[in-house]
Image (spheres, rainbow, N blue to C red):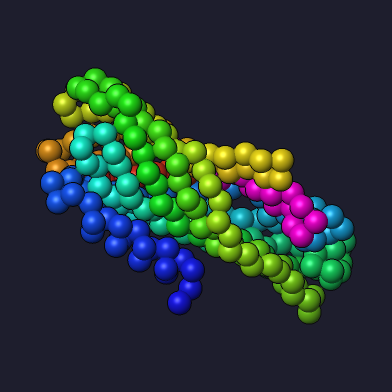
Amino acid sequence: MKIKQLFIIANIMTCLYINASAEFVTSIQGAAVYSGKNDIALPGDTGSRFSFCDDLDSGIVFSPRIEAGYEFNDRHYIGFMASTLRLDADGTLDRDIYFDNKLFASGTEVNAEYRFDSYRATYRYYFLSNEKLKFGAGITGKIRDAEISLEGGGEKGGLSNTGAVPLINYYLELLLSPEFSLVTYGDAAWSPYGRAEDIFAGFLYRFNENSALIAGYRMLEGGSDNNTVYTFSMFHYAVMGAEFRF
């Protein structure tokens, strides 16, 4: 069984042990995603750095996301998140590119693929929770399942990687009225070898106690710089979705 499947099952089993009086909260989101930056070199130390955005043509893509968890004892949240991102790019190279120890010569028509799937488990503690403000922070364990590839001129190269990353989590909600809230939340981390940020800012409109509309902006940014691969990206998300509580 793949590591991401074990990760999801473990989180579902954890939720089942939570106090039965807890409130279950889930959101289903979809986003139109625009690539602001997507720079890659493979290998990271000897490959040619090029851009899926600047050197190739890549369009707006759709990315789904689901979040589900429990809030219990008015102070605690535990849950999981799953999202996928697929990006295709193509074009004609205007210079030689060395990628995965292969030469893609200038003038070659190429196709490139970028995949970034994320699975996370989060624990968060709410330091403030009242009728006007809700603020919490915690930790997230993230499994990143990523892949990049380049093909053209009879050559094909690529790299796939699955790894675990610890992140800092936060949640801040300003309740403007019983119906409207401004919300920002996300995960982030930094190290000398890379960084990761996934930040949402937007609003909730509550139709009733159990359902709400979500709309806003998400920024996904980060990457790593090592001998194996150099990759730094920034994606801009226009998000729409719904939240349900039971």
Q: Which residues are magenta?
A: 217-235
Q: Position of residue 216 (x, y in %)?
A: 38, 37
- On the image, which quarter does residue 99 sit in? bottom right
Q: Is residue 93 visible?
A: no
Q: Position of residue 227 (x, y in %)?
A: 80, 56
Q: Is 224 part of what is drawn in magenta?
A: yes
Left or right, 55 with reference to 170: right
Specify the quadrant that holds the N terminus: bottom left
- Secondary structure predominantly adopted by residues drawn in magenta: strand
| Residue 124 visible (yes or no) | yes
Foreground: 80 or 94? 80
In the image, taking residue 200 as reference, residue 244 lies left or right, namely: left
Identity of the residue drawn at 84% across and 55% down: 45
Q: Tally the marks.
A: 0
Counting from the top left corner in percent of width and height, residue 100 is at: 79, 67
- Looking at the image, the residue that sits furthest to the bottom is 154
| 70, above or below 164, in the image | above
The residue drawn where x is 27% and y is 55% is 15
Location of residue 133 with respect to 221 vertically, above or below: above
